[in-house]
Amino acid sequence: MTIIASLMLSSTLLLHFESFLLTPMGCCNTGVLNSPVFQKTEAWGYLWVLLIRGVGWTTWVFLSVAILKYSNNSVGCSTKGFEMGWNSTMNRTQTEDEANLVEIDCTGEIDFMGKMMTPSTAIPFTTSIGVILSCVISPIFGALIDRTEKRKLWTFMSIGLFIFINALQIFTTPDNWVLMLALQNFVARIGFQMHVACVAAYCTEIAEGEQEIIALQSAGRIAETGAMVGTLFTTIIGSTILGFGKDVGSTAAFAQSLATAVSIPVFIHAFRKFEDRPALNKTEGSILTSGFVQLYHTARSLYNNNTYVLQYLLGLSFCDGGNSNVFVLFPIYAMLQTGLENPALFTGLAMIVCIPGALSTKKVATKVGIRRQLGNILFSNSVICAVLAGAIYQDGNFLGILLVSLGFGLTIGGTYPMQKGLYMRLIPAGQEVEFQGLYNLFSQLLQPLPLMWFVYCEDEMVGGENSMRIGMLGLVMFYFMAFLLMSFFMNEHAAVEKVKDTLHKRVRGKGVVGEGSAKVDPI
C-alpha cells in the first residue's frame, strides 16, 4: 500500500507538466505543441487518456510473461520445459537431468475452456478469442457512439473498465492465472476497443483542418509512447531496487500497481477536460446491425470507386496484425524456445527502440519517399521474423534475441509515421473516421490468424523441436502480404488524384464547443 500511495502522489505531480508546457520556459512555442489545437482544453484531455492507454498496455507485457510462467508451472514445466515435467517418453514427474537426457520438451496439457492444450498455446488461443469478440462488438459500439448524447460518459466508462481490470490483475497468482488471462483478453481488451472508438469520434471534432489533426495525433503518439517507455523503465528499475527483478510474478504485480496508481489521478484530470459531443452524423436502423451495414456500404463504395484505398486499408491491417502479434508471440518464443527466464526485458527493449526507429525512418523517407520507405520497413520485418524462426532457436541464444529485439524496435517504430503519412494522402477528406472503422474491422478479422497458426503448430506437432519455429512463420507471411499490398502493388499517384477534389473539406471552420475549451484551464 505504501508503494501505491507513493506512486499516486508522484503521478499527481506529473499533471503539473501540462502547466510547464504552457509557460514561456516550456516547449509550447516549438514543435507540434505550437498548433492552435492545444489552446483547447479537450486536446489536453485527449493526450491524457492516451497516456493511460500507453501505461496500461505496457504493463500487459510483464503480466503475459508471468501468466506464461504460471501456466507452465501448473503442469510441472519450467520455462525450458526440462525441470520437473512430463513428456511423451516418461509418464511421471522427472528430474531436470532425466529430462535433459531424453531431450524432449515438456508436453503437459491442461483443460483450458474445454480444450486440452499446452501452456504455450493458451495465451495466443485466448488472445484470438478476445480479438474475435472485439471484432463483433466494435461495429455495434460504434453505432451506439454515433447516436448517444453521452459520448463523454461512454468514453470514460470504457477506459475506466480498462483501469479496473489492471487493478484486479495486481493480485495474479499461480492459482488464479486462468481467470486473470480471461479478464485480460476478454474484458479489458473489449473495454480498450470501445475506448478506441470513442476517442476516434472525438479526435476529428477537437481538431480543425488537416494540420491540427496531424499535430494532435503526433502529440498523442508522443504521449502514448512516452508513457510506455516511462512505465517500462519505472517497472524494471523499481523491481530491481525492491529486490525481485528476476521474479516475473512480483514484477508483474508491481507493474499493474504502477498502472493503477498513475491511471486513477490522470483519469480524474482528463475527465474534467472533456465535454459531451453528440455525434454529427447519426446512423439509422438498429444499433445491433447499423454499424455492420455502414461498413458494408463503405467497402462496396471503395471497391467500385477507389480500390487503391481499399487495398491500402487491407495492407494496413496485415501490417498492424503483424506488429501486435510480435508482442504476443515473441515473448513466448523467447522464453520457451531459447529458455530465457524473463523475455519481458527484451520486449521492453524493442518498445524503447521504437522511438529512434520512428525518428530515423522519417529522415530516410524525405529522400526516398513515404511509400518506398514503408515498403522497405515491411520487407525488413518479414526478414527479421524469418531470421528469428530460422536461425535463433537454441537454448541460451541471448545475443540473437537481443539483436532481433533491436531490429523489431527500429522497424515497428518506423511503420507508424509512414502509415499515417500515406493515410493522410490517400484517404478522402471527411471520411477519415468512416474508413478507420473499416480498417478496424479488417484488422480484427486478420489479427487472430498468426495466433491461430501458432496454436495449430503447437497442437499438431506438440513437443516437436520445430513446432514454434514453424508457428512463427505466420508473422513472415503477414508482413510480406502487407509489403505487397501497401508498397509493391500500390499506385499512389492514382489514389492521390482521387483525393484532390475533397481536400477543401478538411478545413471545416468549426468553432470551439463550450467556453471552457477556449483555453487550457489551470491545474
Image (spheres, helix red, strand yellow):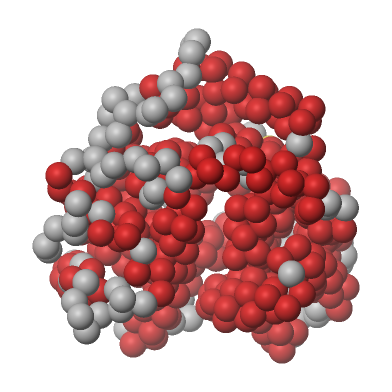
Q: Position of residue 64 (x, y in %)?
A: 53, 60
Height in image: 34 above or below 68?
Answer: below
Q: Position of residue 491 (x, y in %)?
A: 83, 51
Q: Quadrant of residue 394?
A: bottom right
Q: Quadrant of residue 509?
A: top left
Which quadrant of the rendered structure holds the C terminus?
bottom left
Q: Position of residue 392 (x, y in %)?
A: 81, 78
Q: Nearer the viewer, residue 500 or 264?
A: 500
Residue 207 horizontal side relative to residue 103, left or right: left
Q: Nearer the viewer, residue 400 or 181?
A: 400
| Residue at left offset 60%, top offset 58% | 420
Toward the top, the furthest residue is 285
Height in image: 115 above or below 264?
Answer: above
| Residue at left offset 64%, top offset 40% | 501
| Residue at left offset 74%, top offset 69% | 369
Task: Specify whether residue 152 is in view.
Answer: yes
| Residue at left offset 53%, top offset 43% | 504
Which quadrant of the rendered structure holds the N terminus?
bottom left
Q: Nearer the viewer, residue 244 or 57?
A: 57
